[in-house]
Image: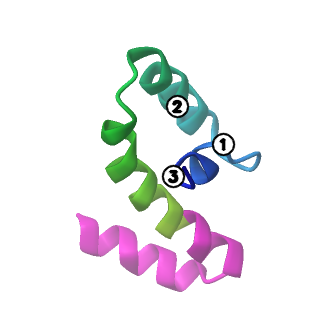
Amino acid sequence: GSGAAPVVSPAGFPLKHSNTLTNRQRGNEVSALPATLDTLSIHQLAAQGELIQLKEHLRKGR
């Protein structure tokens, strides 16, 4: 499924890779879905170069 596409991101952080490996080993792809969605939002914002938006997003999360 397309759900695996975002999980295998070459530009993903090391933490993401570690989590992905653990999730794959366990076989709980569903557990990785929510974590991936949040990560994708941050990655997209950072990719656009909107540091201000990224900071606000993080502050709102807190």
Spatial CA span between label 2 and label 3:
12 Å
- Comparing 3 with 49, the one in front is 3
Instruction: Write the start and end of the magenta stretch as one range.
Output: 43-62
Q: Is residue 56 above or below residue 41?
A: below
Kind of residue sitting beneath label 2: Thr
> Is residue 15 left or right of 26 when viewed as pictured?
right
Q: Residues within 10 Å of mark 1 (few under 14, many from 20)?
A: few
Label count reads 3
> Is residue 60 left or right of 18 when viewed as pictured?
left
Q: Mark 1 touching mark 2, by CB under 8 A?
A: yes
Q: Earlier in the sequence, mark 2 or mark 3?
A: 3
Q: Quadrant of the C terminus?
A: bottom left
Q: Main structural element of the magenta stretch: helix, strand or loop?
A: helix
SS label for mark 3? loop
**Which corner quadrant of the image does residue 59 belong to?**
bottom left
Q: Earlier in the sequence, mark 1 or mark 2?
A: 1
In the picture of the structure, the residue carrying the numbered disc 3 is 3
Kind of residue sitting beneath label 3: Gly
Residue, x 69% and y 48% (percent of image)?
A: 9
- Comparing 16 with 46, the one in front is 16
Kind of residue sitting beneath label 1: Val
